[in-house]
Image (cartoon, helix red, strand yellow):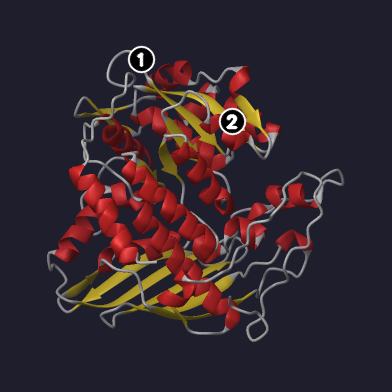
Amino acid sequence: MDTALSRRSILAASAFTIVRPQLVRGQGKEKLRAGLVGCGGRGTQAAVDMLTGNENVELVAMADIFEDHLEGSLKSLRDPKYISRHAGIVVERGGQPKEMSARDLVESIQPRVAVTPDRHFVGFDAYQKLAASDLDIVMLATPPGYRPIHFEAAVEAGKHVFTEKPIATDATGVRRFMAAGRKAAEKHLTVMSGAQRHEDRPYVETVQKIHDGALGEVVALYANYLSGPVFHANARDPKWGDMEWEHRNWYSFLWLCGDQIVEQHFHNIDFMNWVMGAHPERVVASGGAAWRPRAALYGNIYDHMSSDFTYPNGVHLSSTCRQYPRGSFNNVSDTIVGTKGRAGGTELGTKGISAYVQEHIDAVNSILGRGPYINQSIPIAESTLTCIMARESAYSGMAITWDQILNSQQDLMPKQFGYDLQTEPAPLPVPGQYKFV
C-alpha cells in the first residue's frame, strides 16, 4: 500500500472539496445531531466537550455493549454536578472567547442531552443501529480494537466522525481504517481524531516554529510516558462469560487495547511524527512485564517498553513508556533537540482554550464549511501503525521496518462475539518465541 499516495489523496480531496455540505441542520435553529458509541469515561467526557464547544449540537443517541455503561453515562450527562466539574473552560462563541460558569454550562448542555429510550442501543451490533439512525455526527469512543469496524460503518452510513485514538490494534485494522478514511474524503465527510494535540494552540505553534527553523536542524528526539495503570476490574463476577470479562477489563487484553505504547504513548509518538513530517522507517524495541503479575486480571500486555525509532533522515527517537503502581515516578514529556537549541512540546507556543473542546469546535466548523475541511484519518492511522511497529518489535525481539508492519497479516479481531463466548487469551509475548506475522 502506498501510504504517501494515500495521504496525498486525502489532501487533494480537502483542497478541492466544496466544504459546505448540503445540511439543513446546524446553520439555523435546527441542531446537528450526534450519537455516541462507547459510553465509558472517555466517551462521556467527549460528549460533554462536544456540547460545551458547540451550541448548535445535541446528543440524540448512545450505543454500548453494556446497558449499565450506557445508563451510567447518560445519568452523568444529566447530572448538574458532573457537568459543573467542567466549569471555567474557555470556549469561543461567535469568534469571541467566553468563560463558562458552572451554571452556564449546565443550562447550555442539559437541554441538548436528548437521548430518548428508543435511541438507547445495546449489544455487539449497537454501533450499526446507531450509525443507521438520523444523525450527522458519530462519536467513536470504545476500546480501540473496535475502531476500524465502527469507523467503516459510520462512513458507509454517510456520517461525519469524531474518532478517539488509537484507530486500531493491528496492521489489518489500520489498513481497514485507511480504506474507510479515503472513502470519507471521497464523500467529503469530516474526520476528527482524539489526538487533541493537533488542535491545541501551544502544540500547533511549537510545531510551526520548529518547522520554520526555530531549533535549527532537528538531530534527536525523546519521548516519555511513565505512568500508573489506567484501570483494572477488581474482580470477575461469576456471571460474566469470558468475552464479557475481557471487555469489562479491556485494558489488560491486547486485541482490545493494543498495549500501552499504542493506547497511551500514541500521543507522544504521533507528536514526533508531526514534528518530523514523516513516520519512522525502522524500530528496535524491548520490554516486558516486571510488575504486572501473571494472573488473569492482568491479561497479556507488557508494563514497560523502550523503543529506538529511526526516521528517513537518520534522526532517532528514543521512546520509553511504562505503567507501574501508583506512587512510582511519573513523567509524560517530549524533547526535541536541534542544532540551535531544544524544546518540549508546548514551550514555543501560547496558551489556548482546552484542546479537548477545541477539537470539537474545529470538527463542527469543518462540517458546516465555516473552517477548513478536516480529515485526519491517514496521519492518525500512520501514527497508530508506528506504535504497533514498536510493540511488535518488543514482542518478537526483531528489528521491524515500516514496509514489514504495513504488510503485516496480524489480525487480532475475534471472528465471533457474545457475552458468554468462551475465549482463550494469547499468552504474554516472549521474545524469541513470539512470531511476527
Residue depicted at 29% across the width and 52% down the height: 10
Mark 1: which secondary structure?
loop
| Residue 119: image location, x then y, percent | 59, 22
Disc number for residue 75: none
Which of the two residues, 265 or 420, is positioned nearer the viewer here? 420
Which of the 4 image quarters holds residue 266? Answer: bottom left
In primary-sequence order, the first of circles 2 and 1 is: 1
Categorize mark 2 by other alpha carbons within 10 Å: few (<14), some (14-19), many (20+).
Answer: some
Q: Compared to 425, does 29 lie above or below?
A: above
Q: On the picture, is 398 further left or further right than 369? A: right
Of the residues shown, which amino acid type is indicated by label 1?
Glu
Instruction: Identify residue for label 2.
Output: 129
Q: Quadrant of residue 379?
A: bottom left
Q: Residue furthest top?
A: 29
Answer above or below: position of 348 versus 130.
below
Q: Is residue 358 above or below residue 168?
A: above
- Determine if residue 345 is in view: no
Using the rendered image of the protein, determine whether residue 228 is visible from the camera's viewpoint: yes
Q: CA distance from mark 2 to mark 1?
A: 23 Å
Total marks in image: 2
**Quarter occupied by the C terminus:** bottom right
49 sits left or right of 358 in the view: right
Instruction: Determine the residue positioned at 46% across, 39% down.
Output: 156
**Secondary-structure class at tag 2:** helix
The front one of 110 and 247 is 247
**Residue, far right:** 238
Q: Report crowding for label 1: few under 14, some 14 to 19, many 20 or more residues within 10 A (C-alpha).
A: few
The spot of residue 121 in percent (x, y) is 63, 29
* Depth check, front residue: 171 or 142: 171
Residue with the mark numbered 1: 30
Q: Residue at x 34, y 31 (%)?
A: 53
